[in-house]
């Protein structure tokens, strides 16, 4: 007797896709399957669980199959669906920008804490160097209403994405976007209360060992900083020294492998820098170096 045709409802699609992505080395196969299917159906993920018996039409199934195939080939889910949540906010992402990562949220937390402690009564000026998607800058602007943000990136395409995100979250009127190499666009005079950055900090050697979904899809220029990973950060620190206001601060996200080296670099100039701290992220890894302008 002929076997009944399998019904490809939501439940079956999720089960099959989870198993398929697991075999193709996805770190989160079930989550990937849910995000992709919810995106195709234009549903919230929770709706998948209330509509297990729903059978998508052929067009939706074909679109879903294409996404699953691309994910199995390593393409990041965030690029496939065009969004990524960061600091509880949805951000537009494209292959022109790095995908915002949970560990970078700690950079926002520390920035907001410093801004809240400021004794200045006038508007505070924050500079986000290497803004990429604008995730850090927008998150700060969204929660620190007494500040204006200058977002800098060397990539015009990245700035386009950052502008879209600023408008999406209604903070664009308090933000300025500048194309430039670190702080070179600004005269060496005090003008910022806080400089924050998630710059490139991967060494050339480390880059070759990155997971394929990072190395093959995310922009290399936003990741790699010379042979030791410190090239961009050291340039930024030197430029920041003359551009921070008195009692201003700098926060830099970096690799735990270079955190001590960067802290020591700050300490070589005690006449410029004080209150040098290494801060751990939510996983306990040394992720941020903070310093105050003496």
Image (cartoon, rainbow, N blue to C red):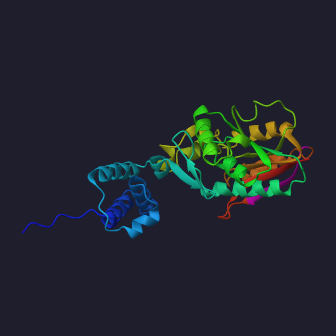
**Range of magenta residues:** 272-279
At 81% from the left edge and 53% from the top edge, which residue is drawn?
A: 115
Q: How far across and how far down the image is residue 63, in percent?
A: 34, 49
Q: How far across and how far down the image is residue 113, in percent?
A: 79, 58
The answer to whether residue 12 is seen in the rendering is yes
Q: Nearer the viewer, residue 21 or 153?
A: 153
What is the quadrant of the N terminus in the image?
bottom left
In the picture as drawn, the residue positioned furthest to the left comes out as 1
Q: Nearer the viewer, residue 265 or 80?
A: 80
At 63% from the left edge and 49% from the top edge, which residue is drawn?
A: 169
At 75% from the left edge and 37% from the top edge, which residue is drawn?
A: 235
Q: Is residue 206 above or below residue 38?
A: above
Is residue 273 shown in magenta?
Answer: yes
Q: Is residue 81 left or right of residue 88?
A: left
Q: Is residue 229 left or right of residue 243?
A: left
Q: Nearer the viewer, residue 156 or 24?
A: 156
The answer to whether residue 203 is seen in the rendering is no
Q: Hey, which quadrant is residue 45 in on the image? A: bottom left
Q: Dominant secondary structure of the magenta stretch?
A: strand
Q: Is residue 31 above or below residue 162?
A: below
Q: Is residue 292 left or right of residue 105?
A: right
Q: How far across and how far down the image is residue 78, in percent?
A: 49, 50
């Amino acid at each position: 007797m002929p076997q009944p045709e399998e019904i490809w409802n939501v439940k079956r699609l999720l089960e099959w896709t989870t198993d398929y992505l697991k075999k193709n080395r996805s770190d989160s196969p079930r989550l990937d399957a849910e995000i992709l299917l919810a995106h195709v159906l234009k549903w919230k993920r929770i709706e998948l669980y209330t509509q297990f018996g729903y059978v998508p039409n052929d067009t939706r199934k074909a679109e879903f199959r294409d996404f699953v195939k691309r994910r199995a080939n390593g393409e990041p889910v965030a690029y496939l669906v065009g969004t990524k949540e960061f600091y509880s906010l949805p951000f537009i992402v494209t292959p022109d920008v790095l995908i915002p990562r949970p560990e970078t949220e700690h950079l926002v937390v520390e920035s907001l804490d410093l801004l809240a402690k400021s004794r200045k009564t006038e508007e505070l000026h924050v500079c986000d160097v290497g803004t990429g998607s604008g995730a850090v800058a927008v998150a700060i602007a969204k929660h620190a209403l007494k500040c204006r943000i200058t977002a800098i990136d060397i990539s015009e395409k990245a700035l386009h994405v950052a502008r879209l995100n600023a408008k999406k979250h209604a903070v664009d009127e308090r933000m300025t976007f500048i194309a430039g190499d670190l702080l070179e666009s600004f005269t060496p005079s005090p003008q910022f209360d806080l400089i924050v950055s998630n710059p490139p900090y991967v060494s050339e050697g480390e880059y070759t060992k990155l997971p394929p979904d990072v190395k093959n899809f995310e922009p290399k220029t936003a990741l790699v900083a010379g042979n030791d990973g410190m090239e961009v950060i050291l340039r930024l620190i030197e430029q920041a020294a003359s551009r921070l206001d008195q009692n201003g601060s700098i926060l830099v996200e970096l690799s735990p492998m270079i955190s001590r080296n960067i802290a020591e670099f700050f300490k070589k100039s005690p006449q410029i820098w004080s209150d040098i701290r290494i801060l751990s992220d939510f996983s306990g890894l040394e992720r941020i170096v903070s310093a105050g302008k003496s």
